[in-house]
Image: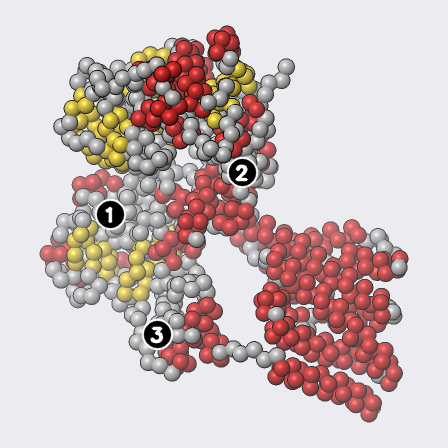
């Protein structure tokens, strides 16, 4: 139990996927203009990460491991994750147009997101058990959402301020992202390992 | 002993020494009176006289149009020489009746006073409306509307606003000192109209003579006199209710929701005249003051007197005028020239010289938070101003821009001289426009 | 070797079969014309068509609720593309551009008072009808500049809005935001305009503006067909533009201007020339 909690805290704060591991920077900068969309994106990522880590865990241990072809891990994972996200998108579009409106537009962005692949690969690298990898995936997703929402809140505030012309847009966003990452360094050492 | 007050607000130098010890003087009539039809909040009155008509002092020259509206009366006897658009204190050309006084200043014979004891509340209210009584604190809200709360609102307190928190102005102060009899009589009538017992006069402690005088005279009438800490904007209704009774008026609600009716002391005195003598609201006390005036005075003026005439009565200008304000310096209306007339809401005329005015360009917000700490409504003026600048009307609405009372504390305190009130007012306009659309 | 090919191939096969099945099972009908029209539109989301954005307009056109010629920024090329997609004939609306009918900059027109407030024309207009003595003149606080989606209108260094006729698409956003109605849309082919928006009488106009129309009728006497005078303000008749430029030199207030003449262009629009 303690291990699971530590994995969760570590994934959310200490080794935050965006701000400490620098995975998934593209959507982090791309869809963080408004808190609402950032939250939607975060939810989509939590969902996809969890499902992906479940599927890849089985792929790893029941197919790749059994036949001794672990070196094909990356390709197999990309293949599985991409088709999985596509499938989820289609199902949501048909079954729940409302959910698709708020979440669906982010799904294509996640299809080949390195943060999702990162979770799957890290699960195997750290030889997590099935339960541990699920918790790790949820933690990673939560950490991603946290970073997104914080950053979107900051950007909303920046939009209200008279930023010097040469800094407008991406420039000031990148500076802010750096500072936010620096702030998350403060969590380092909170959890061992 | 700490005095009662409200949270937030600030204390600008009150600069009342220019005129606080000057007794009220009657202002002689000017060559012509310009009486605009738009003198109160609500629908403008409808002019019902034409060129060449002879009018007496107190004759109706414009009829009320709708519930939130009052009739307008001639301020002296004479001839109507024009009905045309004239310069209004708002800076626009608006319809007005121009009267050439005949010098007799004779009251209309049809106006009759009466003993308030003989009349019931409805009859008193009708008389108050017929006499065109509006709030004389500056907002000019029709008095009969405030005195007609819906049946389900239980009113238990009448608060008389003798705060006069705006710097420079001393008209209410002098009225309380010199015309306390009319004031107390008016309070008694208002109590009768509302059918309540409790009446409180709130006065800031920088008017100790008024507190002492009224305190003595009010005991016999069971009217409380509450000294308040000197702080702006204590004269704003909701802040005054908070200071006097400790009750908070919720967002979007009226004072009646807190069981209170607030009237200015000047309004109470005008009510007394309306009932006892039958005299409509055609004159008021106004302070003509400021560093740009040679001899600051408290004048009793006829409604419609051009501002230039008031300045002439006070010895003229000193130096080059930089800013002319009708009303107080915090919430008053800046004038383009001295061409506009004084109206019912003119509590003062304030003239600053060129060198008194700060014309620095507005800088960027330095996020010092002073506007937030002084806001008596506890809004975030700097945030609202940013929303207004970017036309984020929905965000401004959810940040309660509509609750702003435009008291000017934030603009006054801002070290970057940002036009905060104007920005918030702009956002409010946007919100109202959006609501009208949907 | 074989195992790896088989395994990966197997995974790929299962995935593709599942996806293929799902695509059939969960297909959602989308009008292909809508997407095609969307591609043909400029994508500026300016709102000239009355819809919130290009996607809304594309949907409306595909469903036949709106006419295909409402996209002014796209002009005739967009219209042709949409007409081809829908398979219909459509007549192009004549291209229009915004014209700022004022030349009274800070040097030529008198202020009414010193304005220190919010940098926004609509906010300033609420204070005693604006800080310019002229009731119709450009306030120069840049509300039009901020709202323009095409970067086609700017406030020059003398506080006057100037349209870049090459960039302007005639979407009309500046027209609707201007509190004084000083900007209007005019056919692009007409280059001569009376640049004044004051309906005051001549004597009054002379008091506050050096380049305001005084309603002297000289332009109308020169080209009777080409000009109309209404309430002491001359304007060009867009339907009969023949010969209107002959009145330019005759105007005593120099308020008729031809955008086609480069020499005058530099005199009036130092910004766009630079």
Q: Which of marks 3 and 2 is in front?
A: 2
Q: Where is residue B230 in the image (x, y as percent from the top left)?
A: 54, 20
Instruction: Write down the residue under mark 2.
Output: B251
Q: Is residue B209 visible?
A: no
Q: Please tell me which residue lies in front, C195 or B268.
A: B268
- Displayed quadrant of residue A104: bottom right
Instruction: Write down the residue under mark 3.
Output: C76
Instruction: Write down the residue under mark 1.
Output: C198
Q: Is residue C97 visible?
A: yes
Q: Where is residue A122 in the image (x, y as percent from the top left)?
A: 81, 69
Q: Mark 1 lies on which chain?
A: C
Q: Position of residue B141 (x, y in %)?
A: 39, 30
Q: Could you tell me which residue is drawn at 28 percent across and 28 percent down? A: B72
Q: Could you tell me which residue is drawn at 54 percent across and 33 percent down? A: B249
Q: Which of marks 1 and 2 is in front?
A: 2
Dot placed on the residue nearer the N-terminal end, 1 or 3: 3
Q: Quarter of the image containing the N terminus of chain C?
A: bottom right
The reply to whether discs 3 and 2 touch (Cβ–Cβ < 8 Å) is no
Q: What element carries label 1?
A: loop
Q: What element carries label 2?
A: loop
- Displayed quadrant of residue A56: bottom right
Q: Could you tell me which residue is drawn at 41 percent across and 58 percent down? A: C148
Q: Mark 2 lies on which chain?
A: B
């Amino acid at each position: 139990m303690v291990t699971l909690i530590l994995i969760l805290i570590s994934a959310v704060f200490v080794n935050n996927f965006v701000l400490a591991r620098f995975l998934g920077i593209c959507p982090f900068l791309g869809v963080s203009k408004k808190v609402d969309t950032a939250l939607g994106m975060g939810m989509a990522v939590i969902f996809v990460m969890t499902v992906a880590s479940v599927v890849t865990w089985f792929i790893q241990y029941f197919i790749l491991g059994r036949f001794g072809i672990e070196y094909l891990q990356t390709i197999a994972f990309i293949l599985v994750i991409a088709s999985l996200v596509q499938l989820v998108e289609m199902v949501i579009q048909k079954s729940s147009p409302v959910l698709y409106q708020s979440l669906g537009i982010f799904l294509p962005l996640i299809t080949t997101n390195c943060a999702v692949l990162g979770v799957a690969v890290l699960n195997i690298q750290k030889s997590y058990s099935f339960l541990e990898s699920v918790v790790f995936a949820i933690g990673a997703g939560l950490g991603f959402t946290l970073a997104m929402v914080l950053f979107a809140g900051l950007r909303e505030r920046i939009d209200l301020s008279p930023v010097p012309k040469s800094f407008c847009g991406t420039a000031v966003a990148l500076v802010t992202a750096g500072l936010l990452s620096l702030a998350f360094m403060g969590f380092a050492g909170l959890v061992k390992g | 002993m700490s005095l009662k007050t409200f949270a937030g607000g600030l204390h600008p130098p009150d600069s009342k020494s220019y005129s606080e010890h000057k007794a009220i003087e009657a202002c002689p009539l000017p060559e012509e009176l310009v009486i605009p039809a738009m003198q109160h909040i609500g629908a403008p009155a409808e002019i019902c006289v034409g060129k060449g008509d002879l009018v007496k002092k107190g004759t109706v020259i414009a009829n009320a149009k709708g519930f939130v509206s009052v009739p307008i009366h001639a301020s002296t006897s004479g001839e109507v020489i024009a009905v045309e658009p004239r310069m209004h204190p708002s800076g626009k050309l608006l319809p007005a009746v121009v009267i050439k006084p005949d010098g007799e200043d004779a009251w209309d014979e049809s106006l009759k006073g009466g003993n308030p004891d003989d009349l019931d509340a409805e009859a008193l209210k009708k008389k108050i409306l017929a006499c065109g009584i509006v709030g004389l604190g500056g907002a000019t809200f029709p008095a009969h509307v405030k005195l007609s709360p819906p049946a389900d609102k239980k009113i238990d307190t009448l608060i008389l606003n003798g705060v006069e928190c705006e710097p420079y102005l001393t008209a209410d102060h002098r009225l309380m000192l010199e015309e306390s009899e009319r004031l107390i009589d008016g309070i008694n009538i208002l109590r009768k109209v509302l059918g309540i017992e409790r009446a409180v006069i709130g006065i800031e402690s920088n008017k100790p003579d008024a507190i002492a005088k009224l305190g003595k005279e009010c005991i016999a009438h069971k009217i409380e006199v509450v000294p308040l800490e000197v702080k702006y904007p204590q004269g704003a209704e909701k802040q005054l209710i908070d200071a006097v009774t400790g009750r908070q008026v919720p967002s979007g609600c009226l004072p009646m929701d807190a069981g209170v009716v607030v009237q200015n002391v000047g309004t109470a005195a005008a009510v007394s005249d309306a009932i006892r003598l039958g005299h409509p609201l055609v004159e008021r006390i106004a302070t003509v003051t400021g560093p740009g005036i040679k001899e600051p005075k408290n004048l009793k003026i006829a409604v419609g007197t051009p501002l230039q005439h008031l300045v002439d009565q006070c010895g003229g200008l000193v130096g080059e005028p930089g800013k002319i304000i009708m009303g107080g310096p915090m919430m008053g209306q800046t004038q383009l020239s001295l061409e506009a007339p004084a109206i019912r809401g003119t509590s003062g005329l304030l003239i600053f010289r060129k060198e008194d005015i700060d014309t620095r360009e507005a800088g960027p917000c330095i996020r010092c938070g002073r506007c937030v700490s002084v806001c008596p409504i506890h809004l975030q003026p700097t945030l609202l101003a940013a929303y207004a600048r970017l036309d984020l009307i929905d965000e401004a609405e959810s940040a309660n821009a509509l609750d702003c009372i435009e008291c000017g504390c934030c603009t006054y305190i801002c070290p970057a001289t940002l036009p905060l009130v104007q920005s918030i007012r702009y956002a409010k306009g946007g919100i109202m426009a959006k609501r009208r659309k949907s | 070797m074989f195992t790896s090919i088989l395994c990966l191939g197997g995974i790929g096969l299962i995935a593709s079969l599942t996806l293929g099945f799902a695509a059939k099972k969960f297909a959602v009908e989308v009008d292909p014309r809508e997407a095609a029209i969307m591609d043909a539109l400029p994508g500026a989301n300016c709102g000239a068509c009355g819809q919130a954005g290009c996607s809304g307009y594309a949907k409306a056109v595909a469903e036949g609720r709106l006419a295909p010629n409402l996209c002014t920024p796209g002009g005739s090329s967009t219209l042709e593309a949409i007409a081809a997609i829908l398979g219909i004939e459509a007549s192009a609306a004549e291209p229009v551009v915004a014209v700022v009918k004022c030349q009274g900059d800070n040097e030529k027109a008198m202020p009414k008072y010193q304005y220190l407030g919010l940098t926004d024309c609509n906010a300033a207009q609420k204070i005693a009808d604006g800080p310019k003595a002229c009731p119709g003149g450009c306030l120069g606080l840049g509300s039009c500049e901020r709202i323009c989606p095409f970067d086609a209108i700017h406030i020059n260094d003398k506080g006057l809005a100037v349209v870049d006729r090459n960039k302007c698409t005639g979407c009309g956003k500046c027209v609707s935001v201007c509190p004084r109605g000083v900007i209007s849309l005019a056919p692009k082919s007409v280059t001569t305009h009376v640049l004044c928006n004051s309906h005051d009488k001549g004597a009054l106009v002379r008091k506050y503006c050096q380049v305001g129309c005084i309603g002297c009728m000289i332009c109308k006497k020169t080209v009777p067909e080409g000009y109309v005078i209404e309430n002491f303000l001359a304007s060009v008749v867009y339907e009969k533009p023949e010969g209107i430029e002959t009145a330019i030199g005759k105007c005593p207030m120099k308020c008729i201007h031809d955008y086609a003449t480069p020499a005058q262009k530099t005199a009036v629009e130092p910004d766009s020339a630079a």
